[in-house]
Amino acid sequence: MTWLLALAGLLTVAVPLALLYRPLGDYMAKVFSTDRHWKVERGLYRLIGVDPDGQQTWQAYLRAVLVFSGVGLILLYLMQRLQAYLPYSLGLPAMPPDLAFNTAASFVGNTNWQAYSPEQTVGYTVQMAGLAVQSFVSAAAGIAVSMALVRGIAGRRRKTIGNFWVDVTRANLRLLLPLSVIAALVFLAGGVVQNFSGFTDVTTVSGGHQLIPGGPLASQEAIKMLGTNGGGFFNANSAHPFENPTPWTNLFQVFLLLVIPFALPRTFGRLVNDKRLGNAVVTTMAGLFLIVYAAITAFEVSGRGTAPELAGAAMEGKEQRFGLLGSTLFATATTGTSGGAANSTHDSYTAFGGITEMLNMALGEVTPGGVGAGLYTILILVVVAVFLTGLLLGRAPLMCGKRIGLREMKIASLALLALPTLALGGLALTLGIPPVRDQILNEALSTGGPHGLSELIYAFISASINNGSAFGGLSANSVWLNVTLGLIILLGRFIVIALVLALAGSLAAQDQAPAAVAELPLHTPQFVLGLMALIVYVAVPTLLPILMAGPLAEGFG
């Protein structure tokens, strides 16, 4: 019965995703390929001094991404530091410099890691004009970069890969904003709060007093999920009844996390004129998602210990209104995208459930990944798979008529090395400096031993892959962790983006391979299985040694 219910919950989300795969994917292909500009878009281009019909090289595109993101980082930092002087600050003080930097880096990097309790730290102006705005534009930047890579694959002997300012404007105005309005209305119908009431003093049933925070929540919740952001309005995030009131709003949140990332392979297939390759990419994403969901659910259902066995499952840290299956489905979606949202405490999952969540992030977040980021990450892995398969079979390594040579492999390999280098390097530096290590062990971790190490490992993997979720037992609001994790978030985001755009430029400059050169069939079940195996092979061995000292040691212990 448990597995039938798990299948029913999965199908409740999968069926609408499948129905929207083609129309939404085709719509996005039209959005990013048409030459027509809306009047409001032309007004914005004139305001910022951009020629919407001008094309950019990959270097110019990268400069635009960095300038756009850098300005956003500075503005969000200043808003947090000046919060006390802003309207609707709710009497809250300015954020400390290190926490403001961490938060700004996190939201600009589409990571949304939060080392603070939002309802006790951030006023409405910073929430709406700062955090929510970055939730839109950082998600749009990810989509824009993925479209630049797709144009590089589809282009022939071109030096340009599009116009970042046009891409990011269209991603916001034609995609994220209208879908967010619809999603916000659905959340309102489901009971999600939307007001400016501040803090309400209520008398509890026991005669005590409690401050209940309100806020413009439904509008923030829409882009939080749709843009795979995850920054919660409340500290409890999607476990809070004001953010996620009912089982059906829980499933709707999962749907919003997945709908754009799962439709983007269709957009890719349309733009490169190879729909079968797009279908192979989405099949790979879906296959890995199913494996992770089944694994996390199995580990939680069979949770060992007196309390889990009496409850019938490992229900500690999970909301009763969602149940175990609603929690594991959400956990699979949020660790498989860059959505740091959580409707349960990952710190309370079984050791093997927790390690599966970590490995899901370590796959590169391609199950299906964040908006835009999931597509360009899996396309990097396709490049590697094509090259290796060509070597094994003695065939020319071609992808959409483009040769995958030494230059492309170097770029792809560097992109794949970013996650383990940043995660393991940051972790080693943190534990290698005695004063920092002592502070972490004595003040930041909720427990010692393998589980405490797991909390720390999770944090560094989450930051480097731009996920933003956490085990929950780590008190990360310290100067060292705020600055270190903030830097890792920025490096994990923009080093990979720079390499993706370099790959796009390299591929765009190529001509179509001669017709006499036989191309590998990339839409077959064999290639899909090979790609899935490559993704697992790249992710697991790199992090397995450190995982053996944390969650694996805890699980086998």
Image (cartoon, grey):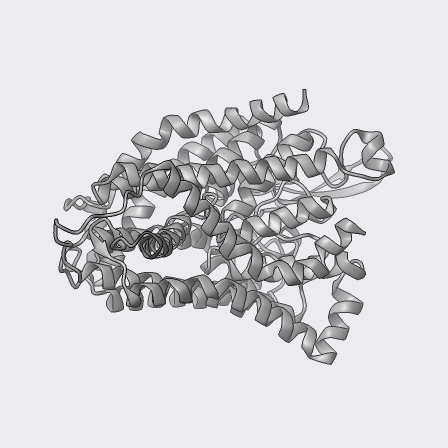
Q: Is residue 44 visible?
A: no
Q: Position of residue 141 (x, y in %)?
A: 36, 55
Nearest the viewer among 409 and 61 is 409
Determine which quarter of the picture holds residue 334: top right
The residue lying at 58 percent from left, 32 percent from top is 250
The residue lying at 29 percent from left, 54 percent from top is 394
Left or right, 130 with reference to 90: left
Left or right, 239 with reference to 449: left
Nearest the viewer among 189 and 432 is 432
Nearest the viewer among 120 and 93 is 120
Q: Position of residue 57 (x, y in %)?
A: 21, 65
- Image vertical order of residue 170 relative to residue 384, above or below: above
Nearest the viewer among 156 and 544 is 544
The residue lying at 44 percent from left, 68 percent from top is 74
- Image vertical order of residue 110 relative to residue 522, above or below: below
Picture quarter with the N terminus: top right
Q: Position of residue 307 (x, y in %)?
A: 85, 36
Determine which quarter of the picture holds residue 321: top right
Q: Position of residue 368 (x, y in %)?
A: 45, 43
The residue lying at 31 percent from left, 39 percent from top is 523
